[in-house]
Amino acid sequence: MRPQHNLVELPAGKTLADVLPVFKNVEDERHIGMPTPVCAGCRKPFTAVRKRRKAFRLYPVDICQAAPVAFAYSLCGRCWSHYQAGGDRKEALMASIDAFSDGSEATQ
Ligand SMILES: [Zn+2]
C-alpha cells in the first residue's frame, strides 16, 4: 500500500503560473521567518554533517486563490535522495513532508 499524502506535484511541462495563475506576474519573492532547524523529511536537526541540501516548496492552493504564497521546507541529503529515488521512497518522503507541514510527528 502506498503512503498517503495530500501533495500534488506540478504536472510535467506545466509552470507554476499555469496551475496557479496568481503567480503569473510574480517577479520577486520575500522570505518571512527562519528556516526550520530540522529536516522536513526525517525531522533530524541540521548540523555541520547533516546539511540542508534542497528546499521543497508547498503551495497552498486555497490561499493561492488570493495571494501568491509558498512554504519552503529544507531537506537533508538522505531525504532528498529518497525523493530522487522515486517510487515508494518518494511517496513516503512526500507523506512525511505533508505531515510536517501540518505539524505532525514523523511516521517513517
Ligand atoms: Zn532528512
Image: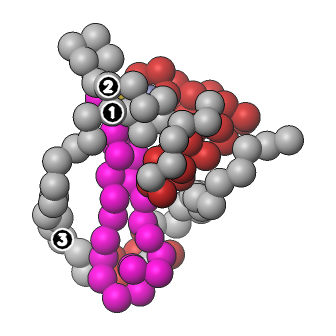
What residue appears at the point 54 percent right and 37 percent down from the top-left corner? 106
Q: Earlier in the sequence, mark 3 or mark 2?
A: 3
Residue 25 in which image quadrant: bottom left
Q: Quadrant of ligand 1?
A: top left
**Range of magenta residues:** 52-74
Residue 63 in percent (x, y) is at 39, 80
Q: Determine whether 38 is above or below 94 in the image.
A: above
| Label 1 CB sits under 8 Å from any ligand 1 atom | no
Looking at the rendered structure, the secondary structure element under dot 1 is loop
Instruction: Work out which quarter of the rendered image holds the C terminus and state it.
Output: top right
Toward the right, the furthest residue is 1
Callout 1: few (<14), some (14-19), or many (20+) C-alpha neighbours within 10 Å? some
Instruction: Reply yes or no: does residue 66 show up in magenta.
Output: yes
Callout 3: few (<14), some (14-19), or many (20+) C-alpha neighbours within 10 Å? few
Circle 2 residue: 45
Q: Which mark is residue 27?
A: 3
Toward the top, the furthest residue is 49
Looking at the rendered structure, the secondary structure element under dot 3 is loop
Disc 1 or disc 3, which is closer to the eye? Answer: 1
Q: As drawn, is 34 to the left or to the right of 101?
A: left
Q: Does residue 54 appear in the picture of this structure?
A: no
Looking at the rendered structure, the secondary structure element under dot 2 is loop
**Residue type at numbered disc 3:** Glu
Does the CB distance between marks 2 and 1 fall below 8 Å? Answer: yes
Circle 1 residue: 38
What residue appears at the point 28 percent right and 11 percent down from the top-left corner? 49
Q: Does residue 66 appear in the picture of this structure?
A: yes
**Residue type at numbered disc 1:** Val
